[in-house]
């Protein structure tokens, strides 16, 4: 069976296997998920991210493929979750509410976290259009209730600033901030702002502002939460509970968004299980056994974290109301379509493999070029994927001396049979499926460099520095692994991992002789141990033990203490006041117009920031740095 036959096989209820690399994304994007609404469930976030990137590379309409991530995996740690993940969850739910074809990629952990119900999401969404009547103070209150942070610049999603009749807001899920220009209580103009300079870019007629937080702290939400708090206190029979939770009650009544407010979500707004929100979507589970294990692990981790808190530190909303039971999620997924990546008696083997055989050894491109030509000679469509046009040019220069001159293609579905082509895009791993007539090879896979979306250059720098550091290590040198702690470097070994494929590993030894084999592609996870005094040898950590985690916890507590002190310092600065200067007048504008040069984006940003500071009622706290280029 070929990859193009996989769709009918799935529709007939048959499971898949033999989908190495990004072959699963290819099948879903080119057949199954071309229309309809699908929920794809992975066991962990890294796998979900790779699947999403592959889908967006192969899909004719990449925007139809949306992630639904979990939070950062630290329930009940006292901190707010990663705002970017919260924003993405809300953006995906809004796309779901709009209807239409959609492919949602999520994880086991994400399906355990309750989400705001449709009424709550609608209450936090505002459509703004030119000519609409809206009071400026009402707009500011709406944005605050919807979770937007009032700052001095709208320089990140979820932030806004209001100055007179101008309100700049960077909507959740938006690519740029927008400026709402009011005349009295009417929207006179809507303008997209350049996110780098903050200057007006393009005008628009209508924008939608999505909520920036899952929870709300408006009047109805506060009343609901206080009533729920009273019910819980009455049910506990502990009259002192009201006094011990006084700070929470005061913050709630004042509408303060305190840390870990998300742990009180069911008390503030109506919630539903994610799978209820995704009702009507067809389910496909990638690695059912792994997903089940991940669900149970996440459930157990949440329970342990809650029970580890002191009684007076625990949110009064119990985990059973904040999270869905793993058994409930598994029951809903029991009828889902399945993908078994490592094979199964119940699965159809599609025969696609990864691209490991095409990794360049040393600097010799010859064997790889020969294999690419061999694939093309078998009437296979071969696509080499690069990140941008500059890398495409460099690749063509590297291949030309070997007699390979690839065609240029715009889309994955535009490759010609029997040809090697090069195209620009973001593909994590690629795949080889000669019997199906397709092969896609990211150039990063050819040269063995790790690749991460949105941070490719930084990841490459980390890789190079890690390799350099590893070559400077000697056997028995102490190293520190970011998760497992202090161990001894025991050199490099080469091991067979699967189907005869060999891979290089770093061998690390821990206390009691326990060994850890770390793939060289993950070298950034270790660093050389630096002793506080010359010649001192560290105590080795126990592999799987808790000692290193406790050490990291102490360091984190110290850093948090420093951060709190800085916050208190800047809070005092914010409370200091002064008479603000007025907005620049005609004489200043005339002086500005006589400047004979065009400002660079950085200069324009600095000028605008200083002018904003001068018109505020607080002392300016800013350092402007520059060179002497203009004398």
Image: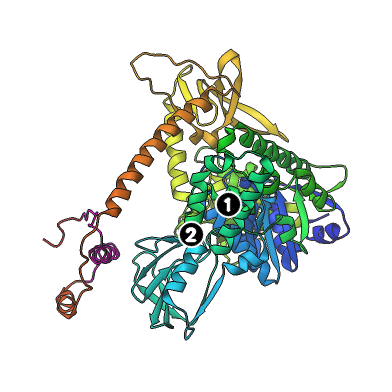
Q: Is residue 64 above or below residue 79?
A: below
The verdict on residue 373 being magenta is no
Residue occupying image coordinates x 18% and y 80%:
586
Apparent side of residue 323 relative to residue 509 in the rendered image (left or right): right
The mark nearer the N terminus, 1 or 2, is 2
Counting from the top left corner in percent of width and height, residue 90 is at 59, 61
Counting from the top left corner in percent of width and height, residue 596 is at 16, 74
**Mark 1 lies on residue:** 442
Residue occupying image coordinates x 71% and y 61%:
277
Whether residues under marks 1 and 2 lie with C-beta atoms below 8 angstroms apart, the answer is no
Q: How is the image coloured?
A: rainbow
Towards the viewer: 161 or 515: 161
Q: Which stretch is magenta? A: 598-625
Towards the viewer: 625 or 397: 625
Towards the viewer: 449 or 250: 250
Q: Is residue 293 above or below residue 19?
A: above
Q: Is residue 350 visible?
A: no
* Disc 1 element: strand
Q: Is residue 21 above or below residue 169?
A: above
**Mark 2 lies on residue:** 388
Quadrant where the C terminus is found in the figure: bottom left
User: Marks 1 and 2, Cα distance to the nearest angstrom?
Assistant: 12 Å
Towards the viewer: 574 or 329: 574
Counting from the top left corner in percent of width and height, residue 420 is at 61, 58
Q: Is residue 520 visible?
A: yes
The verdict on residue 618 being magenta is yes
- Tell me where residue 123 sits by quadrant: bottom right
Q: Categorize mark 2 by other alpha carbons within 10 Å: few (<14), some (14-19), many (20+).
A: few
Apparent side of residue 150 relative to residue 217 in the rendered image (left or right): left
* Dot label at residue 254: none
Residue occupying image coordinates x 83% and y 51%:
15
């Amino acid at each position: 069976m070929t990859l193009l036959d996989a769709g009918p096989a799935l529709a007939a209820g048959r499971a898949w296997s033999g989908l190495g690399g990004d072959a699963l994304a290819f099948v879903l994007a080119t057949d199954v998920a071309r229309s309809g609404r699908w929920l794809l469930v992975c066991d962990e976030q890294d796998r979900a991210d790779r699947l999403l990137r592959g889908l967006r590379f192969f899909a004719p309409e990449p925007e139809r493929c949306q992630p639904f991530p979990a939070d950062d995996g630290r329930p009940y740690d006292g901190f707010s979750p990663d705002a970017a993940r919260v924003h993405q969850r809300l953006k995906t739910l809004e796309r779901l509410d709009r209807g239409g074809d959609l492919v949602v990629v999520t994880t086991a952990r994400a399906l355990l976290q309750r989400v705001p119900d449709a009424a709550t999401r609608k209450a936090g969404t505002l459509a703004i259009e030119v000519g609409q009547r809206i009071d400026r103070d009402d707009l500011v209150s709406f944005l605050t209730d919807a979770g937007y942070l009032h700052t001095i610049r709208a320089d990140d999603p979820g932030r806004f600033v209001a100055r007179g009749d101008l309100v700049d807001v960077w909507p959740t899920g938006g690519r740029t901030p927008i400026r709402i220009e009011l005349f009295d209580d009417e929207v006179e103009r809507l303008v997209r702002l350049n996110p780098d300079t903050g200057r007006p870019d393009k005008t628009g007629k209508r924008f939608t502002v999505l909520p920036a937080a899952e929870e709300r702290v408006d009047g109805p939400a506060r009343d609901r939460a206080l009533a729920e708090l009273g019910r819980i206190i009455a049910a506990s029979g502990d009259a002192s509970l009201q006094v011990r939770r006084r700070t929470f009650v005061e913050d709630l009544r004042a509408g303060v968004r305190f840390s870990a407010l998300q742990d009180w979500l069911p008390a503030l707004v109506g919630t539903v299980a994610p799978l209820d929100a995704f009702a009507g979507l067809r389910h496909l589970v990638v690695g059912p056994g792994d997903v089940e294990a991940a669900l149970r692990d996440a459930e157990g981790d949440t329970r342990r974290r809650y029970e580890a808190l002191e009684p007076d530190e625990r949110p009064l909303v119990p985990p059973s109301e904040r999270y869905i039971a793993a058994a409930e999620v598994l029951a809903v997924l029991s009828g889902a379509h399945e993908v078994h990546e490592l094979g199964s008696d119940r699965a159809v083997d599609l025969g696609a493999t990864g691209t490991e055989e095409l990794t360049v050894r040393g600097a010799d491109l010859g064997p790889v070029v020969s294999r690419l030509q061999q694939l093309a000679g078998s009437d296979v469509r071969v696509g080499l994927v690069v990140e941008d046009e500059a890398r495409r040019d460099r690749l063509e220069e590297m291949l030309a001396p070997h007699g390979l001159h690839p065609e240029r293609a715009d889309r994955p579905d535009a490759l010609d049979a029997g040809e090697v082509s090069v195209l620009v895009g973001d593909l994590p791993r690629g795949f080889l499926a000669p019997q199906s007539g397709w092969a896609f090879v990211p150039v990063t896979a050819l040269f063995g460099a790790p690749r991460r979306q949105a941070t490719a250059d930084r990841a490459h720098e980390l890789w190079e520095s890690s390799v350099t550091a590893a070559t400077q290590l000697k056997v028995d040198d102490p190293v520190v692994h970011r998760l497992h702690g202090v161990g001894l470097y025991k050199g490099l070994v080469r091991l067979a991992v699967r189907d005869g494929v060999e891979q290089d590993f770093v061998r690390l030894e821990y206390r009691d002789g326990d060994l850890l084999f770390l793939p060289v592609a993950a070298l950034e996870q270790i660093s050389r141990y630096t002793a506080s005094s010359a010649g001192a040898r560290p105590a080795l950590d126990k592999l799987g033990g808790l000692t290193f985690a406790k050490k990291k916890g102490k360091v984190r507590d110290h850093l948090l203490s420093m951060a709190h002190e800085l916050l208190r310092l800047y809070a005092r600065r914010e409370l200091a006041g002064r008479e603000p200067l007025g907005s620049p007048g005609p004489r200043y504008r005339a002086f500005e117009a006589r400047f004979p040069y065009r400002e660079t984006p950085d200069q324009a940003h600095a000028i605008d920031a200083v002018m904003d500071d001068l018109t505020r009622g607080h002392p300016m706290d800013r350092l402007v740095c520059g060179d002497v280029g203009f004398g």
